[in-house]
Image (spheres, rainbow, N blue to C red):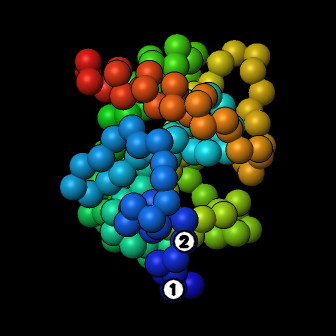
């Protein structure tokens, strides 16, 4: 599969679609999932185009996982979660729905079920509140 620069994440990176950004550096970008599996569900994407794990270069993958590693405890603490689930899907058969390599950081609480992977869109105000909690925690870290 070749990279399609009209995918939703490419459009977010170009500023063509809005998002609730929580972090950005030279190589990666992180924002809240608009169909979160849990409150505070964030995505980390590389700025370089790559479909998935099968075509991403090692340096890009390392930058993305470095950002995941940095954000995961901040998101856990900001959302007062009991744990964090990290997910990464490759190809449609594995559940990948946006074909730009990305990682999910999903806060988890004891006895709270996850919402479906492609569930309902969250209210923008809720996303804004969660993004602010995480951004505030990031500023303190």
Which numbered disc flags the more N-terminal residue, 2 or 1?
1
Above or below, 125 against 28 in this view is above
Residue at image location 60% in from the left, 65% down from the top: 98
Q: Position of residue 113 (x, y in %)?
A: 77, 27
Q: Secondary structure at mark 1?
A: loop
Q: Is residue 12 left or right of residue 116?
A: left
Q: Residue furthest bottom?
A: 2
Residue at image location 34% in from the left, 41% down from the top: 23
Residue 138 visible within the image: yes
Q: CA distance from mark 2 to mark 1?
A: 12 Å
Residue at image location 35% in from the left, 20% down from the top: 137
Q: Secondary structure at mark 2?
A: loop
Kindly indicate the quadrant of the structure image that contains residue 70: top left
* Residue placed most toward the observer, 112 or 126: 126
Q: Which mark is residue 2?
A: 1
Density class for disc 2 (Cα within 10 Å; few <14, some 14-19, many ≥20) is some
Density class for disc 1 (Cα within 10 Å; few <14, some 14-19, many ≥20) is few
Above or below, 113 against 18 in this view is above
* Residue placed most toward the observer, 139 or 65: 139
Residue 54 visible within the image: no
Q: Quadrant of the N terminus?
A: bottom right
Q: Which mark is residue 7?
A: 2
Kindly indicate the quadrant of the structure image that contains residue 108: top right
Above or below, 105 against 58 in this view is above
Residue at image location 76% in from the left, 16% down from the top: 111
Q: Is residue 64 left or right of residue 128?
A: left
Q: Are marks 2 and 1 in contact (CB under 8 Å)?
A: no
Q: Quadrant of the C terminus?
A: top left
């Amino acid at each position: 599969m070749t990279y399609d620069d009209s995918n939703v994440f490419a459009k977010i990176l170009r500023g063509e679609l809005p998002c609730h950004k929580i972090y950005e550096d030279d190589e990666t970008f992180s924002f809240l999932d608009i169909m979160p599996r849990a409150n505070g569900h964030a995505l980390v994407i590389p700025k370089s185009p790559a479909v998935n794990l099968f075509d991403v270069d090692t340096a890009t993958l390392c930058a993305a996982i470095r950002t995941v590693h940095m954000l995961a405890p901040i998101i856990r603490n900001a959302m007062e979660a009991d744990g964090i689930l990290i997910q990464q899907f490759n190809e449609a058969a594995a559940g990948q729905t946006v074909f730009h390599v990305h990682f999910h950081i999903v806060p988890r609480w004891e006895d709270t079920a996850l919402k479906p992977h492609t569930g309902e869109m969250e209210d923008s105000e809720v996303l804004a509140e969660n993004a602010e909690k995480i951004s505030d925690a990031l500023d303190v870290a």
